Amino acid sequence: MNYYNEIKETLIKNEIYKKVKDYSKNKSDLNTYFEVGRLIVEAQGGEERAKYGNKLIKEYSEKLTKELGRGYGVSNLKDMRQVYLKFRKCRTLFGELSWNHYVVLSRINDNNKINYFINLSKNLNLSIRELKARIKSKEYERIGKNVDTREPKVNSLIKNPILIKVKNKNENEKLTEYALHQSILENMDDFLKELGMGFAYIGNEVKIKIGDRYNYIDFLFFNYIYNSFVIIELKVTEMRAEYIGQVMKYIGYVNKYIRKPFHDETVGVIICRKKNKYVMEFCTNPNIFATTYQSI
């Protein structure tokens, strides 16, 4: 087989197809570049030899560029090979993601991590820039292993730590709860993204009356995926047992006076400076979770 001619013909057909049927050009790119990656691997003598054989790619790149124009540089052909090697066990690539999404994902070694970002990109329509930023922030590592965003659970989607943008950050000064609170309000869009999918902001310093005393919930959110209200309390100290009692009280109030029968149980999240595993070990409420924050 003349692999170069096969690759050239495949690329030419793709260019013609895209001009005629522009609405499906992304899917055509995915199929074409994936097929080119397969042909390159075969031309190099299989997967093991393909890992090291870049001389052939350089030769093909020079000829394709001369005959077809720009877009077929050495790095692009290497990407086609890499994507094929990474996703060859998949019979098809998801059309919701662009070729460049797969190029970025092909550089990840952990398959669970790849699946996490595939689902996240599909569900949130992440741009390439947003996908790269989430990978760089170590989002997957902060959530934990074996995460499945197709059936998200509250405790599996809470990041640790939560990254909070802080203006005029000083490493030598400890944040006050007020400063942390204000930083979240000033960067609410970023905070919602940090919390995960499906969160909607309801209010801050939400005033409730328990007995003859007023209390204030730091933040109240609703999550349409969990179909539940989410209480968030901020603490700039290590996790303490009394924080659990405080949040349990708030959960009870929201369940009784705000939550409707068609809503799921209210969830409480305590964001503190440092975890205390012994405190959480004996927390009997399955709807209370603790995590830490990191100012950036």
Image (tube, grey):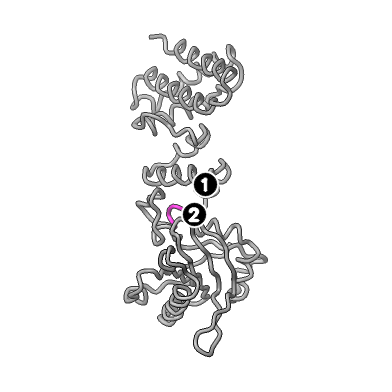
The residue tagged with tag 2: helix, strand or loop? loop
Instruction: Report x, y in % for residue 197.
Output: 49, 54
Query: What residue did someone put label 1 on?
Result: 124
Instruction: Report x, y in % for residue 13.
Output: 51, 14
- In this picture, residue 84 sits left or right of residue 213: left
The residue tagged with tag 1: helix, strand or loop? helix
CB within 8 Å, label 2 to label 1: yes
Locate the N terminus and report the quarter of the image it occupies. Answer: top left
Tell me where the magenta segment starts and ends, as one range.
138-142
Q: Nearer the viewer, residue 252 or 248?
A: 252
The quadrant in which residue 66 appears is top right
Judged from this view, the residue extending furthest toward the bottom is 212
Q: Nearer the viewer, residue 211 or 8?
A: 211
Which dot marks residue 63? none
- Earlier residue among tags 2 and 1: 1
Instruction: Report x, y in % for residue 69.
Output: 61, 17
In the rendered structure, does residue 140 fall within the stretch colored magenta? Answer: yes
In the rendered structure, does residue 107 fall within the stretch colored magenta? Answer: no
Q: Main secondary structure of the magenta part?
A: helix
Q: Nearer the viewer, residue 134 or 254?
A: 254
Query: What residue did someone put label 2 on?
Result: 197
Tell me the amino acid under the disc marked 1. Answer: Leu
Tell me the amino acid under the disc marked 2. Answer: Met
Locate the C terminus and report the quarter of the image it occupies. Answer: bottom right
- Quick one: label 1, few (<14), some, or many (20+) residues within 10 Å? few
- In this picture, residue 125 sits left or right of residue 50: right
The quadrant in which residue 255 appears is bottom left
